[in-house]
Amino acid sequence: MTDITIKITDRNGVLHEIQAPTDMNMNVMELIRSYELAEEGTIGICGGMAMCASCQCYVLNDVLKTERNDDEEAMLSEAYHVKENSRLGCQIHLTEDLEGLEIEIAPEQ
Ligand code: FES
């Protein structure tokens, strides 16, 4: 079992250093929910289908090497508060190479 450390700034600006499992097929949206870093009902509304943007995050460092996928790109083109470093948390799967990832949860949609 391998855990990685991820830094997540919540919507109140509070920084959390989280131990994230890489062997449970989880994504960043599910991680935020499991640590209750965003209010229930304000994140993960579509269940991780890239169809709501409630899980939008800003990526703050260059640990994440993957680009937005097509569904993610389409959803973000319609979402609010989108920045160049926006990603959908549900499309970022927790893998060992994400050790040290730093993200900030975007404002509520
Ligand atoms: S949970 Fe809906 S887009 Fe990620």
Image (cartoon, grey):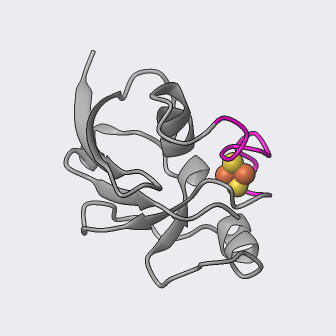
Quadrant the N terminus occupies? top left
Q: Position of residue 10 (x, y in %)?
A: 42, 51
Please identify the residue farthest to the front as the structure is shown. 12
**Residue 26 is one of the magenta-drawn residues:** no
**Looking at the rendering, which quadrant does residue 18 occupy?**
top left
Say which of 76 and 32 sits in front: 32
Tally the marks: 0
**Looking at the rendering, which quadrant does residue 59 occupy?**
bottom left
Please identify the residue farthest to the top as the structure is shown. 1
Q: Decide if residue 12 is on the left or right side of residue 81.
A: left
Q: Decide if residue 38 is on the left or right side of residue 1.
A: right
Instruction: Please determine whether, in this image, residue 70 is positioned above or below residue 50.
Output: below
Residue shown at 77%/58% (left/top)? 52
Q: Position of residue 67 (x, y in %)?
A: 48, 71
Say which of 70 and 19 sits in front: 19
Q: Main secondary structure of the magenta part?
A: loop
Instruction: Please determine whether, in this image, residue 35 is positioned above or below residue 88.
Output: above
Q: Decide if residue 77 is on the left or right side of residue 14.
A: right
Q: Position of residue 81 (x, y in %)?
A: 60, 78
**Residue 47 is one of the magenta-drawn residues:** yes
Quadrant the C terminus occupies? bottom right
The stretch of residues the image draws in magenta is 40-51
Q: Position of residue 9 (x, y in %)?
A: 35, 53
Residue shown at 33%/61% (left/top)? 64
Residue shown at 51%/82% (left/top)? 83
Instruction: Please determine whether, in this image, residue 69 is positioned above or below residue 4.
Output: below
Residue shown at 69%/47% (left/top)? 42
**Looking at the rendering, which quadrant does residue 95 occupy?**
top left
